[in-house]
Image (cartoon, helix red, strand yellow):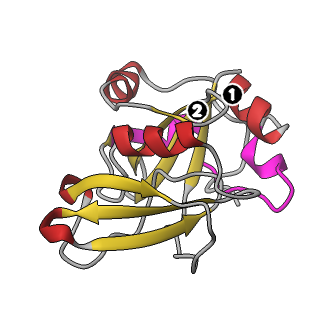
Amino acid sequence: MVLEQGPMAAELSPGVRYQLDKIEPSVEMYGTRLYPCSAQLHDGRMLECVYFVDIASFKRFWGWERPEEVPGGKLSISPDQVASVQESRLRLPARFANQIYRAGESGMGYFNFCLVFSWWYRRDYVVGSFVDFLEYPFWFGPADVRRVILYRNKREARRTPETWWCVLGK
């Protein structure tokens, strides 16, 4: 699904690129640098969970150059639709996401881990290929995460937020 049909723009505006450069990337297990953040679009819509990634990395991971070409489709936006970017309130802090990615998948195509929050509250997660955007327990958010416990046995999966892709480059 694409918000607006038409060719993908090659790059972000200089102002948006500057904002994106301030977002700490995650490095997933194959070395792809992901920039998970919120994106305000020119039409006023706010997308809370958007992965910004260069076209070479996207193609290396998925085998296609554009999100809509991936079998099953990926939600996507064009760089020229983006008015601004900022940290997402649903993002797992990069240091914890990178720890999970470095450990590798728990099983074929999924990650299984527990987040320990302040006040010793814990929540188990089983998520697909990417761990950067999560639904947090009520009253908790990214700043409350204290550590990650990695699992190898599959537990009940948690729903992850709807994510979008913005592929940068020609």
Specify whether 22 is left or right of 77: left
For the residue pair 49 and 154, the one nearer the viewer reads as: 154
Q: Please tell me which residue is depicted at 41% across the width and 64% down the height of the picture.
A: 114
Residue 71 falls inside the magenta stretch: yes
Circle 2 residues within 10 Å: few <14, some 14–19, many ≥20: many
Q: Point out the image quarter for the C terminus.
A: top right
Asked if 60 appears above or below 103 in the picture, the reply is above
Mark 1 and 2 residues: CB-CB less than 8 Å, in contact?
Answer: yes
Query: Judging from the image, what secondary structure is the residue with disc 2 in?
Result: strand
Q: Quadrant of residue 8?
A: top right
Amino acid at pointer 2? Val
Tell me where residue 118 appears, x and y as whole percent. Answer: 15, 63
| Tag shown at residue 57 | 1
Q: Is residue 61 visible?
A: yes
Query: Judging from the image, what secondary structure is the residue with disc 1 in?
Result: helix
Q: Quadrant of residue 9?
A: top right
Q: Which residue is mark 2?
A: 53
Tell me where residue 74 appears, x and y as whole percent. Answer: 71, 56
Residue closest to the far left: 119
Q: Please tell me which residue is depicted at 36% across the width and 73% down the height of the picture.
A: 123
Q: Point out the image quarter for the N terminus.
A: bottom right
Q: Please tell me which residue is depicted at 65% across the width and 22% down the height of the picture.
A: 169
Q: Which residues are magenta?
A: 66-85
Tell me where residue 47 appears, x and y as whole percent. Answer: 43, 57
Q: Is residue 84 visible?
A: no
Q: Quadrant of residue 86?
A: top left
Circle 1 residues within 10 Å: few <14, some 14–19, many ≥20: some
